[in-house]
Image (spheres, rainbow, N blue to C red):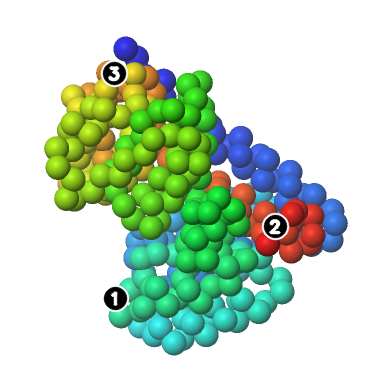
């Protein structure tokens, strides 16, 4: 079996083209969607991510505000900036790049973001709305996973889906989206017994544990669809996912590559959420 490669680069390119069209429509009406990006400290990976998000935003016609704070920034100082951005009528979306430095209360910062500007979809109010099926913003990486699943012709409804990883950023939200798509969902984590058996029983596998090659290809059910969220750097500098790609690709019906799979979709979905926020502010979209 030769797996279909679910190309996140191509899928994100198509989504970004749609985002650009909708952003242009906003500009024609006299307002420009604006994303405020907050980076605290000098984490190299975070700086790369922020540059990439800012560059793509500008290509789509989205204005950006870049706020780079030193690693010594206190929780109180960061909260003050978030409050300023909440009240800034030019800002539609607020992105606080994670992880924050040790000593900064991440939960307090995320809770302080105006839910109507929380384009990451991390605010408890927005996560709660997702659970009840009335999302304001769908979290970006889970949204990207679902868009990639849609590239495969087999319907999700009725399938057995396994989510490996239970974070509030990926695992729990994507499980809710799969449930809403009528999959039968199992969540696996560090205390799951016999993970290979769970993988072998799954028609859809979402891997989001952050451990390189954690899921072996030999575990994968023939014909399964594999979405690998993990991005892990090996000692030789190469990137790999949470799933052993070669072995899984030999058995799966479809699989995402790493890099080039979920990663590009995350940024595209973020910018899509930002334009959605701008259009809601202008009364062009229905939503709360």
Quarter of image, res 102: bottom left
Residue in the picture at 66% in, 69% down = 91
Quarter of image, res 204: top left
Q: Report whether residue 7 is seen.
A: no
Mark 1 Cα shell of 10 Å, populated few (<14), some (14-19), many (≥20): few
Mark 3 Cα shell of 10 Å, populated few (<14), some (14-19), many (≥20): some
Could you say which disc has been placed on residue 287 in the image?
Answer: 2
Q: Residue 176: percent from the left, percent from the top?
A: 45, 47
Distance from the alpha carbon under mark 3 to that under mark 1: 43 Å
Asked whether 276 or 50 is in front, the reply is 276
Q: Residue 29: percent from the left, percent from the top?
A: 85, 57
Q: Is residue 252 above or below residue 233?
A: above
Camera-nearest label, 1 or 2:
2
The quadrant the C terminus occupies is bottom right
Could you say which disc has been placed on residue 102 in the image?
Answer: 1
Q: Mark 3 points at which residue?
A: 222
Mark 2 Cα shell of 10 Å, populated few (<14), some (14-19), many (≥20): some
217 to the left or right of 98: left
Residue in the picture at 47% in, 29% down = 156
Residue at the outermost bottom position: 76
187 to the left or right of 147: left
Distance from the alpha carbon under mark 3 to that under mark 2: 41 Å
Residue at the outermost right position: 29
Could you say which disc has been placed on residue 275 in the image?
Answer: none
Distance from the alpha carbon under mark 1 to that under mark 2: 36 Å
Determine contact: label 3, label 1, CB under 8 Å: no
**Disc 1 element:** loop
């Amino acid at each position: 079996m030769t797996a279909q490669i679910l190309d996140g680069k191509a899928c994100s390119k198509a989504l970004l083209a749609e985002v650009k069209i909708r952003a242009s429509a906003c500009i024609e009406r006299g307002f420009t969607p604006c994303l405020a990006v907050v980076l605290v400290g000098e984490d190299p990976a975070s700086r790369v991510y922020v540059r990439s998000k800012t560059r793509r935003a500008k290509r789509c016609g989205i204005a950006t505000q870049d706020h780079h704070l030193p690693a010594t920034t206190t929780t109180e100082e960061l909260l003050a900036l978030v409050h300023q951005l909440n009240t800034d009528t030019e800002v539609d979306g607020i992105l606080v790049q994670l992880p924050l430095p040790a000593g900064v209360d991440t939960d307090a910062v995320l809770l302080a973001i105006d839910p109507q500007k929380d384009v990451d979809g991390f605010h408890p109010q927005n996560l709660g709305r997702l659970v009840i099926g009335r999302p304001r913003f769908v979290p970006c990486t889970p949204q990207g996973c679902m868009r990639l699943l849609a590239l495969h012709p087999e319907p999700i409804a009725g399938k057995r889906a396994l989510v490996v990883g239970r974070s509030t950023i990926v695992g729990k939200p994507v499980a809710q989206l799969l449930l809403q798509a009528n999959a039968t969902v199992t969540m696996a984590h560090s205390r799951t017994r016999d993970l290979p058996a769970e993988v072998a029983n799954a028609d859809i596998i979402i891997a989001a544990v952050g451990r390189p090659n954690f899921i072996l290809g030999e575990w994968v059910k023939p014909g399964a669809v594999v979405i690998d969220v993990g991005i892990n750097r090996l000692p030789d500098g190469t990137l790999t996912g949470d799933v052993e790609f070669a072995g899984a690709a030999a058995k799966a019906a479809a699989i995402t590559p790493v890099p080039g799979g979920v990663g590009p979709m995350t940024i595209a979905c973020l910018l899509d959420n930002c334009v959605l926020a701008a259009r809601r502010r202008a009364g062009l979209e229905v939503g709360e």
